[in-house]
Image (cartoon, coloured by chain):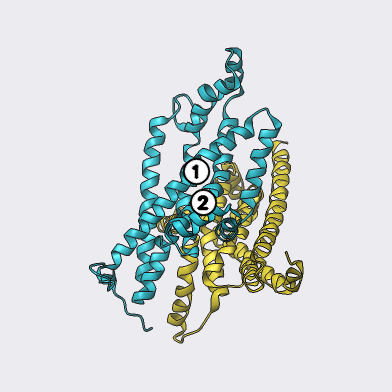
Amino acid sequence: MNYNWDWAVFFKSTGIGEEIYLHWFMSGLLWTLALSLCGWLIALLLGSLLGTMRTLPNRWLAGIGSAYVSLFRNVPLLVQLFVWYFLIPDILPESMQTWLKQDLSPEVSGFLIVTLCLGLFTAARVCEQVRTGIEALPRGQRQAAAALGLTTAQTYRRVLLPQAFRIVIPPLTSEFLNIIKNSSVASLVGLMELLAQTKQTGEFTANLFEAFTMATLIYFTVNMGVMFTMSRLERKLRVPGLIALGGK
Amino acid sequence: MEFNSLIDALPALLEGLQVTLKLMVMAVMGGIVIGTMLALFRLSNNRILSLSASVYVGYFRSIPLLLVISWFYFLVPMIIEWMTGKPEPVGPFISSLVAFTMFEAAYYCEILRAGIQSIPKGQVSAAYALGMNYRQTMRLVILPQAFRKMAPLLLQQSIILFQDTALVYAVGLMDFLNTARSRGDITGELPLFLLSAGAVYFVISFTASRVVMHLQKKLAIAQAH
């Protein structure tokens, strides 16, 4: 097998100024994290709203929530990305088109589109988790709130949501890990996130094996970091008295 | 919009759909076989087996599928060359199939592990009391029940796999989505082709998840009795 192993490849110069290949990975990681975090913000806000809507007595609102989930969960992420990336910009109003296509650099406009796509895709998943969390609460909670004279809005804000959010931390953590992994699709529309930088390093140096190993290690480390942080957060916010969470 | 271009492209699209379905079915079968083995390893008393299975699962679950697909595209030919001693172009289908099978096996493993663990211990004791050995106990008593219990989750995972096959775009395999996209580019009808492809994915996944939901309800009733 003619393969030249070279684990020091990451410290070699890319030929551009002082830059070494490790810098490419770092910049890729930053793009990946930026995409995931911004996408997550959209997903969390929209997903919580939709998840709450699905549990409301109002049929219309619940229907909108479930239609959204059906649509965004049954179309592959890549199809959604292509629609956002290739089709949606062309049907925007003239002024927004100029802004997106000319005023912004391709990097930034690509970033915005992928973030939106990831956010809306993940929102459907967050929605289901939030809904499950609300539905998992004992019925007495809602009834007690009603008996105390709280309105529906107050019941959600003061009673249901604070508890639901605390019990859905573990599934939301895995959705967050998913959005980090899913952000790699950005490489398919030319955004230089971690996977794209990995491929580029592999092509430039012909050390594909080392490059992919490095990417794996980085994803693995990020994963571990997120899980560690979230399990600490979960322990801190645990609802006392619930068996599932190990309370007394 | 020119619907004629869509009709002209129909044979190519069907061929692409065939590639997608073939990839999915083969990866599901391979993934479940390897996943079952991994689940048994993870639950085995042999420390080395259970540790290596959990490293496998942890590894594949923490990296993006797209990374695995791209990596295997280059790795699979390398391994084959190393094993057989001569370079052999394997093409994107085989390398994607290996990638999907190995990746999904980690997810199937976790589902099956939960399934096996949900079977009451008395079942194992009863099988041993009847004189069965470990293999017989697993094959005839535990696994059939675990599979039955986990059927909805296994199917759900397979629907996810079906959608994920679109990612083979990364290695240029002409699956359903990639065919639709390239035909759309050629004819200048990209919106029509992309939206139609999306609709096909939607209908298949939506119908399949409805079936799974129905199955889940039936199983829940059967278990309640």
Q: In this view, does A58 lie to the left or right of A208?
A: right
Does label 1 or label 2 sit earlier along the sequence?
1
Q: In which quarter of the image is residue B122?
A: top right
| x then y, percent, for residue B136 | 61, 57
Quick one: quadrant of the C terminus of chain A? top left
Residue name at image x 34 percent, y 59 percent: A27
Work out how far the residue at label 1 is from the one at label 2, CA to CA, in angstroms.
9 Å
Q: Quadrant of the N terminus of chain A?
A: bottom left
- Tell me where residue A55 sits by quadrant: top right
The residue under label 2 is A118
Residue B113 visible = yes
Disc 2 residue type?
A: Leu
Q: Note whether A188 is above or below B114 in the view shown.
A: below
Q: Characterize the local packing of mark 1: few (<14), some (14-19) or many (20 or more) Cα atoms within 10 angstroms.
A: many
B187 is higher (above) or lower (below) than B221: below
Tell me what residue is drawn at x 47 percent, y 48 percent.
A39
Q: Mark 1 lies on which chain?
A: A
Q: Mark 2 lies on which chain?
A: A
CB atoms of marks 1 and 2 within 8 Å: yes
What element does badge 2 sit on? helix
Do pointers 1 and 2 mark residues of a single chain?
yes
B4 up-or-down from B131: above or below: below
x, y percent for residue B118: 58, 43
Quadrant hosting residue B92: bottom right
Can see residue B53? no
Observer-nearest residue: B4 or A184?
B4
Palette colour of chain B = yellow
- Number of residues whose C-alpha sits closer than 10 Å to that of mark 2, classed few (under 14), some (14–19) or many (20 or more): many
Q: Which chain is cyan in the rendering? A: A
Which residue matches tag 1? Answer: A42
Q: Residue furthest bottom?
A: B86
Where disc 1 sits, the SS reads helix
